[in-house]
Image (cartoon, rainbow, N blue to C red):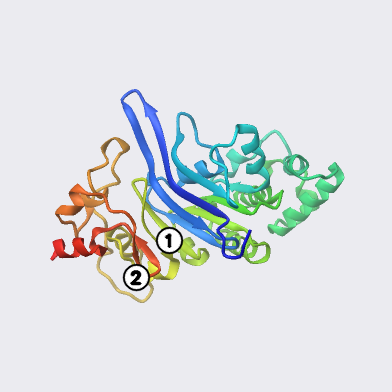
Amino acid sequence: MQAGTPLLEVKNLRVEFPTRRGTLVAVDDISFSIAPGEVLGVVGESGAGKSLTGAAIIGLLEPPGRVAGGEILLDGRRIDNLPYEKMRRVRGKEIGAIFQDPLTSLNPLYTIGRQLTETIVTHLDMTEAAARDRAIQLLQDVGIPAAERRIDHYPHQLSGGMRQRVVIALALCANPRLIVADEPTTALDVSIQAQIITLIKRLCREHGTAVMLVTHDMGVIAETADRVAVMYAGRIAEIGPVRDVIRRARHPYTEGLMGSIPKLGNVQARLAQIDGAMPRLTAIPQGCAFNPRCTKVFDRCRTARPDPIDVGDTKVACWLYDQAGKAAAE
């Protein structure tokens, strides 16, 4: 892979759910890339399509969900159309996954050592003994004390924070180049969250691992991500360097998200709020999907859907940043 080449490229991805009443579009024509060693944060309300995007990348869409358009490329090789068995090997060896609830990722009937060693032996050329040694080392790397003893414990014998660390160790078993982390800190207390964030940053720094971090927590994004993609109703509303997006949000939806976060030292009678709710997949409005909730809406927003527009280092899907849109707004 040449320097500067993205490790992951998602091009015009479309995820659909066929139903008896018609086809629901859950992810609609989104594109982004992640470079080696980079953390891309993906943020938005529940139902925005964040987790489905991650599931499409790792090949774990729940039927009848399907990738209906676009391409997903890993190191320049297309992976969205691979047969199940080939994708299973890519998923274990080249792409690691960290899910929100560790209890759904760990088999309660097996010790964590057995689950780790089976994964290592499946994807790496190692003996059982060597795999066990690597499993102990992984548990130590993710900050589990007394790893030599803990490796023989069952998931129910560990705390929530410990289980999430085991899930991260599982994701790292085969030294993947990409990790898709879906809400990895949501169920953890603040001190454990900070440790998990530190661990993710260390992986990127020391191993050049690329991370797609799906979350609804802007604090985690600000602390961890290099770039952030803000999703709304299955589309990317804004994507750019995390500092630019947080300090100078351009899309009205991103502005609303930023305005709803309390700031230290600022005395405000009320926090900003975004009126209304995310539209259901059966009722996506014409034009910009955010237009019924937008305080800056004008006629063009209700009839035509904006594509991402370059504004400095940021891309914004908003007619306010199109010359014709500006003229119409005025």
Amino acid type of the residue that numbered disc 2 sits on in the rendered structure: Arg
Q: Position of residue 262 (x, y in %)?
A: 35, 67
Q: Is residue 164 left or right of residue 286?
A: right
Q: Which of these two is toward me, 319 or 273?
A: 319
Tell me the quarter of the picture where residue 247 sits: bottom left
Q: Which of these two is toward me, 232 or 82?
A: 82
Tell me the quarter of the picture where residue 273 sits: bottom left
Q: Residue at x 30, y 57 (%)?
A: 253
Amino acid type of the residue that numbered disc 1 sits on in the rendered structure: Met
- The alpha-carbon separation of the residues under discs 1 and 2 comes to 14 Å
Q: Is residue 134 left or right of residue 101?
A: right
Q: Which of these two is toward me, 24 or 272?
A: 24
Tell me the quarter of the picture where residue 59 sits: top right
Q: Secondary structure at mark 2?
A: loop
Q: Position of residue 302 (x, y in %)?
A: 18, 49
Query: In the rendered view, would you say 170 is above or below 36?
Result: above
Q: Secondary structure at mark 1?
A: helix
Residue with the mark numbered 1? 218
Mark 2, Cα crowd under 10 Å, few <14 / some 14-19 / many 20+, is few
Lower position in the chain sequence, tag 1 or tag 2: 1
Query: In the rendered view, would you say 65 is above or below 96?
Result: above
Residue with the mark numbered 2? 248
Q: Quadrant of the C terminus?
A: bottom left
Q: Which mark is residue 256?
A: none
